[in-house]
Structure formats: structure tokens, C-alpha cells
Amino acid sequence: MQRSIPLIFLLLMMINPTAAMTTMEEINHYQINSQGLDVQDNIVAVAAASQGVMFFKIEPSGALTSLGNYSEGTMNAIDVCINGNYAYIANGLNGFWAIDITDFTKIQAVATIKDMNAQKLHCTDQYVLVLQGFSGMALLDISKPESPTVIERTNLGGDLKRGSIDHPYLYTLDVKQSEIDIFKFNSSGIPEFLESHPVEMGLSLATSSNKVYVGKSNGNIQVFDMKDDKLLSSKNITDDGQSSNIMILGEYIIHSTTNKGMKIININNGEIIAQTNVTGTTSLTNQFFIVTQLNLGLGVFKIPNEITLQTNTMAQTTQTSNQTETSTSNNTLNYPYLLLPIAIMTLIRKKNENA
């Protein structure tokens, strides 16, 4: 048995407990005052405050090629989302704008709703949810994308910073009153208020398949189950930093913080799979993370080869209903180092048999 110790020791030295975590490196950086962004296929839309909305094509190398921009009128573009040949802009106190991007060299405004303080957007194929901070929320029907129609305005007080639609429910996060306001769509397609559910320190929100994820000021993520029109606390996922944005893709959480970077976390076991020290709000293609860093610019990061994230054509920073239904069947992660303990035990058994 003594002769087997050096071999076992050598194999134990080969086991790297941090092998599952990859540090993602920035491959391209652009000095753009990026406030918010969205990605559809290989098109990147960036809300760039007074510079309006900029559109880029992301190349296979991760480089961004300019397609055009829209900066007509008084612009304070805070957030943006793309739906087909149209893009929607949260333009702060200047309201909500819809633009036609069929031809990026001739972008035209097709609709404006000026009596809104549009700060954040959440888009699906049929709706745009407009978060207005202390002014509540508005829900727009974009089934006719060139002429959005307001179907609901609600102000329950507080400060609405995040929202999400996971049909038949609509959620808004009130950071002032520390609660999630829950609505349910009726048969006419109008969201009706159900209840407010308390949640402490909530700063970011995402939904997926009747689950609600709340990122907190201490970095932790609280997970709720929606059952029979009630939110039930499910579990907590431990992280650090101050949460700024959450995305759900299959079995992974893409968690951005303001001071501890961005991480890919396995929902099932809470394991951090990959991370970067860059902070900001994230959107992504099948190959790249794109991170807004406000006045620090826009960064492009390569998704590690060992991680497969299946995305669709509407990879929203604030989560679309399509994203939340992403299949997990093709999400794969390889952990060859986990086989080493099995190999060690096999070697020990064979040594004992030969002794």
C-alpha cells in the first residue's frame, strides 16, 4: 500500500478545484456612452444618451461595424429594444419613441408618446413594458409595431426600476417600497393587479417559466416560484456585489453587478462557471457578451468555448418572453476534472488487488 501513495498524491495534485470557473477577457472595447442595449440576431442597438441610438453589426471576430444611428430631436436615450424592423427607445422625460430601422441609412421615427418618463424597457413580440420610476409603468401593444398603443397605465407609488413579462403574469420591481407588484393578464389582454409581494434589497429582476429571480444589493439572488397566483420563496443563490442586471438562459443565470463584475452561475447548484471583472448591463449573441459600461464604454467578451448558451433572436437586457422559454437541451458544460477522483479510486483498487 505504501507504494501507491506517491501515485495517489500526484493525481490529487492534478485536481484543480477552480477548473470549472473561467475568467472571460475583453476582446474589443468601444468608447461609447452606453446606457442600455439590445441584440437581435447579429444587430446590436446601443442607447447612447444625447447621441441617440447607435446600430452595429457584430462580426464573427467580435468587432462591431457601424450601420447607422438615430439622433433626431431631443434625445436622452436610456434604453432600447429591437423587434423586427422596428426599435423602441426609452427617451427619459422626452417619452417613448418608435423608429423604423428597415434601412439603417434612413432611420425614421414612426411614433412618439411624450407624456412618459421612459427609463427602462422590457419587450416581447406583442408588448413593450415601460418602467417610469416614480411615475409607475405603462404597457404598450406593439402588434402593429409602427403604431404602439397604450393599453394600461398604473402607478402604485414607489420607484419602478425593473419589470418582466412571463405570460400570463407581469411583474414590476419597486425598489423604494421593497416589493414586487404582480399583475395577471385577463381574457382581454389587460393586466390586472393581483398583489404586492415583499422582497428586501431587490435591485434587478428576471423571470422564466413561472420562476422569478431577484438580484439584491448584497449580491445574492432570491428565487421564487409562482403557483396559484402566489409567489413562494424557493431558494437563495449566493453571490457578491450589488446586483444591476439578471438574465436567465436555460440553466444559467447571467448576473451583472455594479462592483463585482459579471458572472455565469449554474441555477441548480449555485456554482460560478465563468466571470469577468467588468461591471455593467449585459446582452449577448450566441458567441459574445456585450456589456454596457456607461461612460466607460462598451465591451465585447467571448463566451468561453466550454460553455454553450443557446440564445434566440431577442436577447434582451431586461428579458423577453422568448428568452425565458429558451430550451436547456443544448446547454452543455464539460467537467473532465471531476473524473479524476474516480480514476484515483480505480487505481487504489487495482493496487490492492495486485498486492
Image (spheres, grey):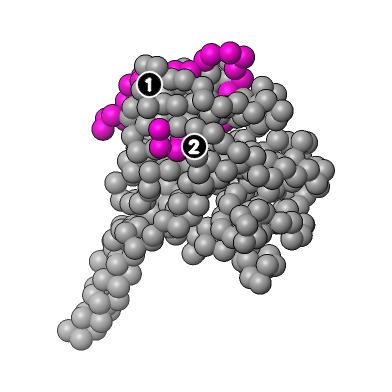
State left or right for residue 33 relative to residue 218.
left
Residues in magenta, as a range: 59-85
Residue 242 is situated, as x and y percent measured from the top left of the image, at 64, 41
Report the side of 66 relative to 92 (left or right). left
- Please tell me which residue lies in front, 16 or 50: 50
Return the residue nearer the eye: 116 or 145. Answer: 145
Kindly tell me whether residue 80 is visible in this rendering. Answer: no
Q: In the image, is residue 13 above or below residue 87? A: below
How far across and down, in percent of the image, does residue 156 sit? 80, 46
Residue 176 in picture, x, y percent from top left = 79, 43
Looking at the image, which residue is at 76% across and 60% down? Answer: 195
Q: Quadrant of the C terminus?
A: bottom left
- Which residue appears at 58% of the width and 52% of the height? 165
Task: Name the foreground residue: 35 vs 171.
Answer: 171
Residue ID at (23%, 75%):
347
Is 227 contained in the magenta span? Answer: no
Residue situated furthest left in the rendering: 354
Residue under label 2, please give it. Answer: 145
Q: Report crowding for label 1: few under 14, some 14 to 19, many 20 or more residues within 10 A (C-alpha).
A: some
Determine which of the numbered discs, if any, sits on residue 104 in the image. 1
Amino acid type at mark 1: Phe
Q: Is residue 179 left or right of residue 27?
A: right
Disc number at residue 320?
Answer: none
Asked if residue 73 is among those painted magenta in the image, a careful observer would answer yes
Mark 2 burial class by Cα count in 10 Å: few <14, some 14-19, many 20+: many
Q: Quadrant of the N terminus?
A: bottom left
Q: How many marks?
A: 2
Check disc 2 and report its element: helix, strand or loop.
loop
Amino acid marked by disc 2:
Pro
Callout 1: SS: loop
